[in-house]
């Protein structure tokens, strides 16, 4: 499922999962649990900015992910 904006923080990916499920669901089929594959990953140092997205959220998200990463 392509996204409009590329994000690497777990909360954003987790929020996108139900939307993807709703788009893929078709009545009458039996569904099973499956894994997720993330493709076309880029380093955070080369992220393209946007005029239409609040970039201040991005720094907060990375600080949160750094804190979570340091716990594991």
Image (cartoon, helix red, strand yellow):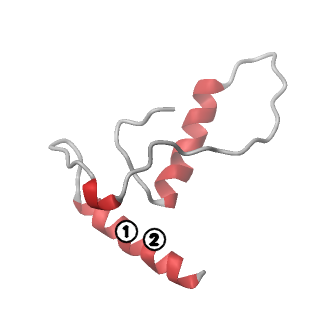
Residue 29 place in picture, x, y as percent: 81, 19
Label 1 sits on a secondary structure element that is helix
The residue carrying mark 2 is 65
- Residue at x 71%, y 45% (from the top left corner): 35
Label 2 sits on a secondary structure element that is helix
Residue 52 place in picture, x, y as percent: 19, 41
As drawn, which residue projects farthest toward the top? 28
Residue 16 place in picture, x, y as percent: 52, 43
- Residue at x 19%, y 45% (from the top left corner): 50
User: 11 or 49, which lies in front?
Assistant: 49
Lateral position of residue 67 relative to residue 46, left or right: right
- Residue at x 15%, y 43% (from the top left corner): 51
The residue carrying mark 1 is 62
* Neighbour tally class for label 2: few under 14, some 14-19, many 20 plus, Cα within 10 Å: some
* Neighbour tally class for label 1: few under 14, some 14-19, many 20 plus, Cα within 10 Å: some
Lateral position of residue 7 relative to residue 51, left or right: right
């Amino acid at each position: 499922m392509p996204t409009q904006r590329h994000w690497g923080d777990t909360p954003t990916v987790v929020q996108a999962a139900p939307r993807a499920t709703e788009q893929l669901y078709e009545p009458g089929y039996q569904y099973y649990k499956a894994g997720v594959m993330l493709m076309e990953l880029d380093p955070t140092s080369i992220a393209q900015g946007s005029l239409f997205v609040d970039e201040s959220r991005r720094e907060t998200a990375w600080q949160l992910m750094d804190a979570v990463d340091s716990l594991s």
